[in-house]
Amino acid sequence: MTDPADMLLTADDRVGLEAAHVRLLAGARHRLCIYLPALEPGLLEGDAAQAELRRIATSGRQAQIRVLTHDAERAHRDGHRLLALAQRLPTAVAIRVPTEEAHLRYGSAFVTDQAGGFLFRPVASRYDARGALDAPGETSRLTAYFEEVWERAEPAWQIRPLGI
């Protein structure tokens, strides 16, 4: 029997946050929702996180990684590895930018997976996070908010490959 404490995710610094992301990504099968107001350099860019993201993105026809960020331009300038993955696998990885002012003021960050896992940072600019690998209620709540914003957001034109 699995200890419920083993299903919890917590972080209070950058290293802990990266480890929590990798644990969550390792449990995901085909679909992720990632809401990061700022795609900070180093976040979700480590080799382990990138390997898991690539695994999910290439997991078959159901593969879908959707990312919402407020500043795709900055992430593009910084050369964030998540954008490079979206350029290489555009059918599996999509990035959008919210357009409504209320959504642009959203200050939290989170990742959810279809298996019921989530990782939530109440203040996106801090590393403090909490989550669980099996919490369908909280995951559904966060995913519903993500869907609402996603439907009203615009594709991040900054990341489209030039095709020259």
Image (cartoon, helix red, strand yellow):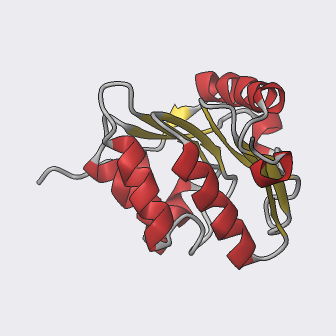
Pinpoint residue 73: horizontal percent, then vertical percent: 51, 59
- Vertical position of residue 6 compared to residue 4: above or below: below
Residue ID at (61%, 28%): 150
* Residue reaching furthest to the front: 1
* Viewer can see residue 120: no
Q: Camera-side residue: 1 or 100?
A: 1
Residue sticking out furthest to the left = 164
At horizontal 47% and vertical 67% (from top left) the residue drawn is 48
The foreground one among 151 and 32 is 32
**Residue 116: percent from left, percent from top:** 69, 32
When the figure is inspected, residue 12 is found, relative to residue 34, above or below; the finding is below
Residue 109: % across, % down: 75, 51
Horizontal side of 65 relative to 2 (left or right) equals: left
> Is any part of residue 83 visible from this angle?
yes
Q: In the rendered picture of this protein, how many numbered marks are placed on residues?
A: 0
* Quadrant location of the N terminus in the rendered image: top right
Identity of the residue drawn at 72% across and 76% down: 14
Task: State the image quarter where residue 105 is shown.
Answer: top right
Looking at the picture, tell me which residue is in the foreground, 58 or 154. 58
The quadrant where residue 18 appears: bottom right
Q: Quadrant of the C terminus?
A: bottom left
Whole-percent x, y for residue 132 in the image: 77, 45
Q: Residue at x 63, y 24 (%)?
A: 152
Going by the image, does 44 lie left or right of 6?
left
